[in-house]
Image (spheres, rainbow, N blue to C red):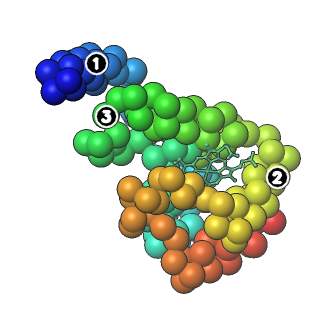
Amino acid sequence: MKKALKITGVILLLVFIAVQLYQPAPNVDKGPAATTDFMQTYPDMPAEMKTIMQTSCYDCHSNNTNYEWYDYIQPARSLLVEKHIKEAKEDLNFSEWNSYSERKQKRLITSIKKQIETKKMPLPSYTLMHNNAKLTHAQIKILTQWLETQE
Ligand code: HEC
């Protein structure tokens, strides 16, 4: 019985190691910084707001994710990290902001404000690991105040 457990343990460990070998291409754009980027679109956006967006939103909603070592652990990388990035970018990619129509930008500005105010973004599963990405009351205020000027 003890031996069977040991063998099962070794097999599970080998399976865990094997799945680590599959690593999808990272969400990192090696080209020049996108000229369509959200922050570049509004040159007078407060620096503080840029920092908040970079820390709390850009890992999923841009073409450049700042990966942490644990983001590479499979199968979580494929099932959570890359899945979230793909879905987030489909809805809203800050790197491509200025290629969106004015109408889409307006809709998204309202949507961003709502997601922040209702604390739906950044995703709670993300802030669990990235504690510094959690928005404080003061940070939410900085973002919503600016967003209101664009509505
Ligand atoms: C861990 C990844 C992740 C982070 C970080 C994140 N988001 Fe998202 N976001 C998603 C995903 C996935 C979706 C789409 C699925 C959904 O609706 O839940 C989404 C959807 C959205 C939408 C809806 C877009 C639409 O079409 O209306 C908005 C707005 C948004 N996010 C804004 C933000 C903002 C602002 C931040 C930073 C404060 C942020 N998100 C941080 C993953 C993320």
Counting residues from the start of the chain, the first of labels 1 and 2 encountered is 1
Q: Is residue 3 among the parts visible in the rendering?
A: yes
Percent position (x, y) of residue 46?
52, 72
Q: Is residue 103 left or right of residue 138?
A: right
Is label 2 in contact with label 3 (beta carbons under 8 Å)?
no
Image: 109 above or below 12? below
Helix, strand or loop at mark 3: loop
Q: Badge 1 is on which residue?
A: 15
Nearer to us in this view, 3 or 103: 3
Helix, strand or loop at mark 2: helix
Q: Residues within 10 Å of mark 3 (few under 14, many from 20)?
A: some
Percent position (x, y) of residue 142?
59, 77
Q: Residue at x 65, y 60 (%)?
A: 120
The C terminus - image quarter = bottom right
Report the amino acid beneath label 2.
Arg
Q: Is residue 17 among the parts visible in the rendering?
A: no
Q: Badge 2 is on which residue?
A: 107
Q: Is residue 76 left or right of residue 113?
A: left
Assess mark 2: CB under 8 A from ligand 1? yes
Q: Residues within 10 Å of mark 1 (few under 14, many from 20)?
A: few
Question: Can you name the residue that lies furthest to the bottom here?
Answer: 138
* Nearest-to-viewer mark from 1 and 2: 1
Percent position (x, y) of residue 92?
66, 43
Report the amino acid beneath label 3.
Ile
Q: Which numbered dot is residue 23?
A: none
Q: Residue at x 31, y 34 (%)?
A: 73
Q: Residue at x 29, y 42 (%)?
A: 70
Nearer to us in this view, 94 or 3: 3
Counting residues from the start of the chain, the first of labels 2 and 3 encountered is 3
Report the amino acid beneath label 1.
Val
Q: Which numbered dot is residue 73?
A: 3
